[in-house]
Image (tube, rainbow, N blue to C red):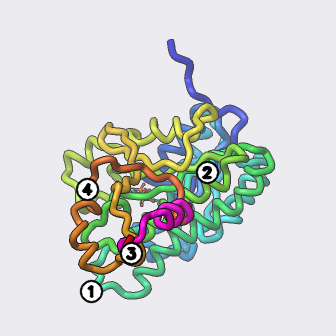
Amino acid sequence: MASQIRYDNQVAVVTGAGNGLGKQYAKFLASRGAKVVVNDLGGTFNGSDAGGRGDSRVADVVVKEITNAGGVAVANYDPVQNGEKIIKTAIEAFGRVDILINNAGILRDISLRNMKTEDWDIIMDVHVHGAMKTARAAWPYMRKQRYGRIINTSSSSGLFGNFGQANYAAAKMALVGFNETLAKEGAKYNICCNVLAPSAASRLTQTVWTSDMMDVMKPDWVVPLVGVLVSQGCKESGSIFEAAAGHYSKIRWERSKGFLAHPEALSPDLILQNYSKIVDWTGAEYPTGAARAKALFEKTSAMPKPSD
Ligand code: NAD
């Protein structure tokens, strides 16, 4: 029989763990030996009480379910925007933090035409600011112990766009850039950071999914991939994964081979003449880093002048 992945002697912080996906992550990790901080302010799905005046019972219920099953967990009711308080709970209760799942989230769906600045701000605040505050607070502990596993939760809306979700999509894509940078900054400290774009029945999908989908596509279906990504043996970092309806996949960037023009020949007409090369995927590459200006500059500089 294959050996079971376990998280004994590890401390996991799961934000937004009072409902939906976060609840299943917390219960799973605890069932495999992790000590878990169950963070949730018990908010509404649209963050109308995201300031921290929610129903603390949702976190308590999850803690109780974990402890009744023989696991170890404590509750934390702070909004993720106060991420340092969530990590403080982990340190005070268990003395360390090994796994952080930035999962808390809300929706304020509305078309751009009707969007108020507060609909934008609250989404940025909970998803982006919240993930940053929590990761930043966990970072020194992970660096010092030279070990950490972080999941930042994105969405297919962020990766591909979705009508009525400009605020949410922007926040979820921000987490991709955030994660890719954390992966680079954490590499030499064995801190692995990955993005997950999940799909599962929850308060966030109940208004748009059919009842058969709600009945079947439970958050438990997302848990196995998360279980692998936050495990000690997994060295994957800086990657984007999807988990939906029992399908698990990885997403990456693709850059066309493109067209290289000599600076002296540049004009919109030249670009138009070579447009088919710019959009042709033949021989595409899969970039994983930002630094390319110097290499391109060297290539361009070595090109013969158009007049030569
Ligand atoms: P959910 O509403 O069931 O659970 C989210 C939890 O986060 C709630 O319990 C809520 O109280 C908590 N929360 C909200 N704001 C908070 C804050 N400021 N501080 C602390 N806790 C807060 O939602 P879910 O579907 O389980 O979503 C979990 C994550 O997955 C979210 O980031 C969501 O955007 C993302 N996601 C979900 C789906 C899906 O299909 N369910 C799809 C794409 C992305």
| N-terminal label among 4 and 2 | 2
In the image, ligand 1 is in what quadrant?
A: bottom left
Label 3 – label 2 distance at C-alpha: 24 Å
Q: Earlier in the sequence, mark 1 or mark 4?
A: 1
Crowd tier of the residue under label 2, counting other residues whose Cα lies within 10 Å: few below 14, some 14–19, many 20 or above: many
In-image side of 167 versus 15 (left or right): left
Q: Which residue is mark 2?
A: 100
Q: Which mark is residue 280?
A: 4
**Badge 3 local density, few (<14 within 10 Å), some, or many (20+)?**
many
Q: Is residue 254 magenta?
A: no
Mark pair 3, 4: CA separation? 31 Å
Magenta highlight range: 294-307
Instruction: Quote the CA–CA distance across marks 1 and 4.
Output: 34 Å
- Mark 3 or mark 4: which is in front? 4
Q: Which residue is mark 3?
A: 167
Amino acid type, mark 1:
Arg
Q: Earlier in the sequence, mark 1 or mark 2?
A: 2
Q: Is residue 301 magenta?
A: yes
Other residues around mark 4 within 10 Å, as few (<14) / some (14–19) / many (≥20): some
Tell which tag, 1 or 4, sits nearer the viewer: 4
Distance between mark 3 and mark 1 Cα atoms: 12 Å
Rate crowding at label 1 as few (under 14), some (14 to 19) or many (20 or more) other CA atoms within 10 Å. few
Q: Amino acid at mark 4?
A: Asp
Q: Is residue 67 left or right of residue 244?
A: right
Which mark is on residue 113? 1
Mark 2 secondary-structure assignment? strand
